[in-house]
Amino acid sequence: MSEPSLDIADCAYVRSDYQPPAGGARPASYQLPGEGGLVVRPATLGSSGLSVRPVASQPGQGPGAWYIYQCTSSGERDALYRAPVWIPDTGPGAAPTPDPEALAQQARNQLRLAGPAIVMSPVADQLVRLPTWLWLDSAGWNEVAATAAAGGVSVSAVARPVEVVWTLGDGGTVTCTGPGTPFPAGADPKSGSPDCGHVYQRRSLDEPGGTFAVTATVRWDVTWAGAGQTGAFPGLTTVSATRARVIDVPALTTGGG
């Protein structure tokens, strides 16, 4: 790759190993004009020392190097008044900086989301007019992350479960903002779940197959971060399914079956 330079007579900006001193004078800046080429804006002297006007690109935003002004004949003293400039690698051999949003999409596509296992109480048959507790296996209610990297840029996408919509097969639906609470051992079977439950009003034995189809659709919020940027994607969903047999036991229910 050829090194950019700006020739004036026998003087030019040349690539160097220069590093700005901490807290010292700031270098000159540059900008790339729309028609191509390189424009260098030398530092200007002011009452407070060297100063430069900010431009769109600055050191640290991509591969490049510091260039210093050197003369091979007359005019050597000009270099004393020209501060080093940072110039990015813009030639054909320069590797393009990866787009963080494109990497974020790759990371999102690598997310492996599984529907958490459904758990209901009672653990066997559900009972008409008595509370059914609904919850999802807590092992599946966790953040899931994936990372994509290229060209020294790394972006991670994170999916967080935020809501679950239950369809209970009898026409009822329940929306819960968490995985639900497991039924405590020894609790009163007539007590309802504090956050996610349903009461069947009819039995499933009269349905084809004798059961109700139950699904739990989890909504996941997906965000990404990397390369100093953040963003969000449309939410993802996973669906878990099971079947519930609902029976009536007059001795345990109020009002019979």
Image (cartoon, grey):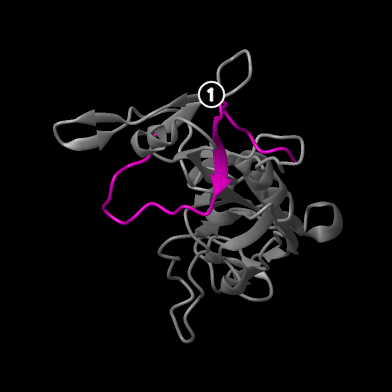
Q: Which residue is pictured at 79% across the width and 52% down the height?
A: 207
Front position in the image: 198 or 5:
5
Residue 47 spot, x, y in % from top left: 14, 32
Q: Give the vertical position of 13 relative to 254 (above or below).
A: above
Looking at the image, residue 66 sits to the left or right of residue 126; the answer is left
Q: Is residue 172 magenta?
A: no
Residue 199 percent coordinates (x, y): 54, 57
Q: Kindly give the residue lying farthest to the top in the view shown.
A: 35
Position in image of residue 140 (x %, y %): 62, 68
Q: Secondary structure at mark 1?
A: loop
Based on the picture, tell me whether residue 18 belongs to the magenta stretch.
yes
For mark 1, what is the residue? 8
- Give the residues in magenta: 1-28
Q: Position of residue 2 (x, y in %)?
A: 72, 37
Taking depth in this image into account, of 175 and 253 the one nearest to the observer is: 175
Q: Quadrant of residue 127?
A: bottom right
- The answer to whether residue 170 shows anywhere in this view is no
Q: Amino acid at mark 1?
A: Ile
Do we see residue 64 in this rendering?
Answer: yes
Q: 241 left or right of 173?
A: right
Residue at x-position 34% and y-position 55%: 21
